[in-house]
Every structure is written in structure tokens, then in C-alpha cells.
Image: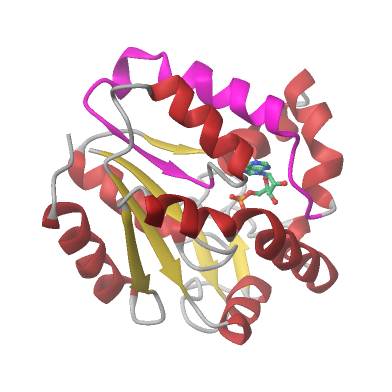
Amino acid sequence: MRVIFLGAPGVGKGTQAQRLAAQEKIPQISTGDILREAVKRGTPLGLKAKGFMDAGKLVPDDVVIGLVDEKLKQPEVAAGYVLDGFPRTVAQAEALDRLLQDRGITHVINLDVPRDEIVRRLSGRRSCPKCQRVYHMDSAPPAREGRCDNCGESLQQRVDDKPETIESRLAVYDRQTRPLIEYYDKKGLLHNLDATGSIERVYANVLAAVHSQRHV
Ligand code: AMP
């Protein structure tokens, strides 16, 4: 299966994509994670991306498309993959269509969460800079305050999860990413899911969607 997770920041794309990829034993390709890692390492890609990311803007299409192109050429994607955070613009979706040709996307899962709940989720989100595990201060706090349960590292708030940046990311989503819902609906690939429930309940719906119809 070749799956795309769509949705605004904070709807739980990363969590659901990670689960599905682990269960199906296929790679999860998260452009956000790849870019954050590049920023942390100070690579040329990271230096190019940092300013856009910190401001809650999209990294230019050619940069992200090049990055995904490289990933999709790796042998480990042959059995399928889960795309998380890509595409985010119509230009990226069109580039992906060109890259994939006859091995196109099989399912697009759009996760839907009301705006006030998204803001609550993003502002309470904390993550471990070492093992990437994600927490929420109210709904999924760590056992020891401020420390990762997994590796003990000090938890951090993403720079782009600060209130002023959240607003700008949501505006970018509305303008540039939301049109992809229609783009994939027209192709008959879209599964629209209510993502307000528990992680388990949403995941059950994700599984039902990816197994409901097998496109070739
Ligand atoms: P995410 O972790 O998916 O929320 O991504 C964090 C940030 O990385 C975004 O706010 C963008 O600045 C950048 N980014 C991730 N994926 C893309 C993409 N497909 N196109 C452009 N920028 C991206």
C-alpha cells in the first residue's frame, strides 16, 4: 500500500502514520522529521529549511520534492510506504504523480479535527529531541515531569508549536494544503476520517479505510 496522510498540523498524522507503517512493516516518510533532523545536524538542507520552519511557513516545493524523490528511489519502499506531511501543496502532489507514474498512491487518509481542538493539541505538545517520542501536557503527560519515559531526555516544545507560529501554520494549511482534499477526492482516493476520538479509535478507522478497497 502507498498511503498519504493529509490534515492540518496537530491532527495526529504522525502518530497514525507511525502506527500504520509499523504494523504493515513499510517505511514512514515524514518530511517534517527529515527536515528537523537536517536542521539539527546543520546540513545544507537544514540551513535552507530552518528559517521557513521556525516561521511556520512551507519549505520551497523544489527542496521538499527533491528530498521525497530521493526517498522513493530507495529499495525499502518497494513494498509500500506511508507519506506523512507530504504533499502539502498542489505542485507537490502533481510532482508526486509524475514521480510515481504507474505505481501511484493507493489511499489518501484525511484526518479531520476542529480548529480549537487543533490549537489545544499543538500548544500542549512536547517531544523528546533524542527518541522523537511525542507527549501532551494534559492528555498524554510523561510519568516524570518534563522527562521522556523512554530515554529520560528533557522534553522540548517545538519552536513552531508556539502560539504565534501555530496561527501562521494553520493559515498556510488553509491556503496551500486544504485544496489537496479536493485534488485526491477527484481521483477517488480520499478517505475522510473524524480524528477527534482516541488514538486507538482513530487508528481502527484508518485500518478500515486502508483495507476497504485495494487500488492497484
Ligand atoms: P510537520 O512536522 O509535518 O508539521 O512539518 C514541520 C515543518 O516542516 C512545516 O511547518 C514546514 O515548514 C516543513 N515541511 C514539512 N513538510 C513539508 C512539505 N511537504 N512542504 C513544505 N514544507 C514542509
Quadrant position of the N terminus in the picture = top left
Q: Magenta stretch: give its range.
A: 56-85
Q: Is 48 placed left or right of 93 in the picture?
A: right
Residue 65 shown in magenta: yes
**Figure check: 189 above or below 39:** below
Identify the residue at the far front of this view.
Answer: 186
Percent x, y for residue 110?
A: 41, 62
Q: Is 168 placed left or right of 37 in the picture?
A: right
| The quadrant where residue 90 appears | top right
Q: Is 115 placed left or right of 7 in the picture?
A: right
**17 and 95: which one is in front?**
95
**Figure check: 38 above or below 124:** above
Residue 82 shown in magenta: yes
**Figure check: 40 above or below 193:** above
Percent x, y for residue 209?
A: 21, 60
Any part of residue 146 in sight: no
Residue at 60% from the left image edge and 27% from the top image edge: 65
Percent x, y for residue 185?
A: 39, 57
